[in-house]
Image (cartoon, rainbow, N blue to C red):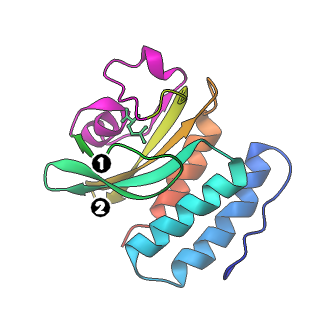
Amino acid sequence: MAEHLTVADGTKEEKYRALYPQLRALVGAETDLIANMANVAAAIRETFGFWWVGFYRVVGDELLLGPFQGPLACTRIARGRGVCGTAWAEARTLVVADVDKFPGHIACSALSRSEIVVPLRCGDEVTGVLDIDSAELSTFDEVDARWLERITALLAP
Ligand code: SME
């Protein structure tokens, strides 16, 4: 995949299965993290049509907005705040079926209804997060968690 993404039809599992090797080839051909984050966000949004797909990087004691696709977003998030800051603090993937029921959820967009946040890791350290928002309830499950963890692992140095 140089400038072209082949978007598969079918189930979520089939779409991830088609997307993953394309991302592996793309990310493997480029060493710059920001460039890779930008294309990964674009590819995920193009494949699934999610409301917002993007990255936050750990910079100092905050998450700082990185490459994303979708509406404007919060620029800085403190550790432990919102879904993103909690996924960072707890160093684990969080699947939120209804963001209104997540204490402290940060509503960057009132249209966001469900969310998944996957930590980026370098060894034991969390270096950022992949955040995906959906405009529908209960969009994400274990299938997304498993594949998105594989995709974020491609971004490890
Ligand atoms: N909802 C997120 C904040 C980031 S935006 O949705 C892009 C949170 O609660 O961490």
Q: Is residue 45 left or right of residue 36?
A: right
Q: Look at the numbered disc 1 and give the secondary structure of its residue.
A: loop
Q: Is residue 91 left or right of residue 18?
A: left
Viewer-nearest residue: 76 or 92: 76
**Which residue reaches farthest right?**
10
Tell me which residue sits at (61%, 31%) in the image: 135
Viewer-nearest residue: 116 or 42: 42
Query: Where does label 2 land, which residue?
Result: 123
* Membership of 96 in magenta stretch: yes
Sequence order check, earlier mark of 1 and 2: 1
Callout 1–callout 2 Cβ contact below 8 Å: no
Viewer-nearest residue: 62 or 29: 62
Q: Is residue 152 left or right of residue 6?
A: left
In the image, is residue 123 above or below residue 100?
Answer: below
Callout 1 amino acid: Thr
CA neighbours of label 1 inside 10 A, class few (<14), some (14 to 19), many (20+): few
- The magenta region covers 79-108
Callout 2 amino acid: Gly
In the image, is residue 82 above or below residue 31?
Answer: above
Tell me which residue sits at (31%, 22%) in the image: 104
In the image, is residue 148 above or below residue 67?
Answer: above
Marks 1 and 2 sit apart, C-alpha to C-alpha, by 26 Å
Quadrant in which residue 18 is drawn: bottom right
Tell me which residue sits at (19%, 48%) in the image: 62
Query: Where does label 1 land, which residue?
Result: 75
Residue 147 is situated, as x and y percent measured from the top left of the image, at 60, 51
Quadrant in which residue 26 is drawn: bottom right
